[in-house]
Image (tube, rainbow, N blue to C red):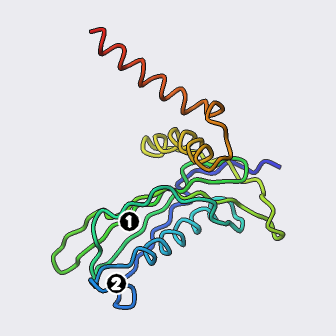
């Protein structure tokens, strides 16, 4: 059963947390595991909003820690579904760190999580199509199929030759290189 398509903006989640002593390592920076936990929670809420279902984390793309987040900082996580497939959804998350006394705010983390909607027995279940409306949403939507194919290839669930979107991307890069060398 195909569910009624939903705009991706309906899945938007903003979560704010204060970095407390119990959240930090010996350098008084937010622990990476705690950050991953918060990202997983925000992304799961986003996927649940989109699907109106129970969701489970299927994968997490590269999470890089650009800057340490200090004790006492306020972190804001923003998550939104970028695209849905039959039962899975890709969710993009941005994390901002704010030092309120100094008035500085920096983007500290970004990642893509994939969730699968499941029924009460834990079996995958169909989710609504995701409808991008803004240019930024459209750009994330368009890249989602390539990111999905890369995840599947790296996870051994898709043969590289089957990753048509990735192959098309590499063909474009090769063509551009040929065009540059011919000029």
Q: Is residue 142 left or right of residue 176?
A: right
Q: Tell me the SS state at disc 2.
A: loop
Q: Residue furthest left?
A: 102
Q: Nearer the viewer, residue 159 or 47?
A: 159
- Residue at left offset 24%, top offset 67%: 105
Residue at image x 81%, y 62%?
A: 123
Give me the disc on residue 95.
1
Q: Is residue 36 above or below residue 47?
A: below
Percent position (x, y) of residue 72? Answer: 28, 85
**Circle 2 is placed at which residue position?**
25
Question: Height in image: 97 above or below 6?
Answer: below
Q: Residue at x 54, y 33 (%)?
A: 166
Q: Residue at x 46, y 44 (%)?
A: 134
Observer-nearest of 19 and 61: 61
**Residue 20 locus on image (x, y percent):** 35, 88
Q: Residues within 10 Å of mark 1 (few under 14, many from 20)?
A: many
Residue 33 lies, in percent from the top left, at 45, 75
Q: Residues within 10 Å of mark 2 (few under 14, many from 20)?
A: few
């Amino acid at each position: 059963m195909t569910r009624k398509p939903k705009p991706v903006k309906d899945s938007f989640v903003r979560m704010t947390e204060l970095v407390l002593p119990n959240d930090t390592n010996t350098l008084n920076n937010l622990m990476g595991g705690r950050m991953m936990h918060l990202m997983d929670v925000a992304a799961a809420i986003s996927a649940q909003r989109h699907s109106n279902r129970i969701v489970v984390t299927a994968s997490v793309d590269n999470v890089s820690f650009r800057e340490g987040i200090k004790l006492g900082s306020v972190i804001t996580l923003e998550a939104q579904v970028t695209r849905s497939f039959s039962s899975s959804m890709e969710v993009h998350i941005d994390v901002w760190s704010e030092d309120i006394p100094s008035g500085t705010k920096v983007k500290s983390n970004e990642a893509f999580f994939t969730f699968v909607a499941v029924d009460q027995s834990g079996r995958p279940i169909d989710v609504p199509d995701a409808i991008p409306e803004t240019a930024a949403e459209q750009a994330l939507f368009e890249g989602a199929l390539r990111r999905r194919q890369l995840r599947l290839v790296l996870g051994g669930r898709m043969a590289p030759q089957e990753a048509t979107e990735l192959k098309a991307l590499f063909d474009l890069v090769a063509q551009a290189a040929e065009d540059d060398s011919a000029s």
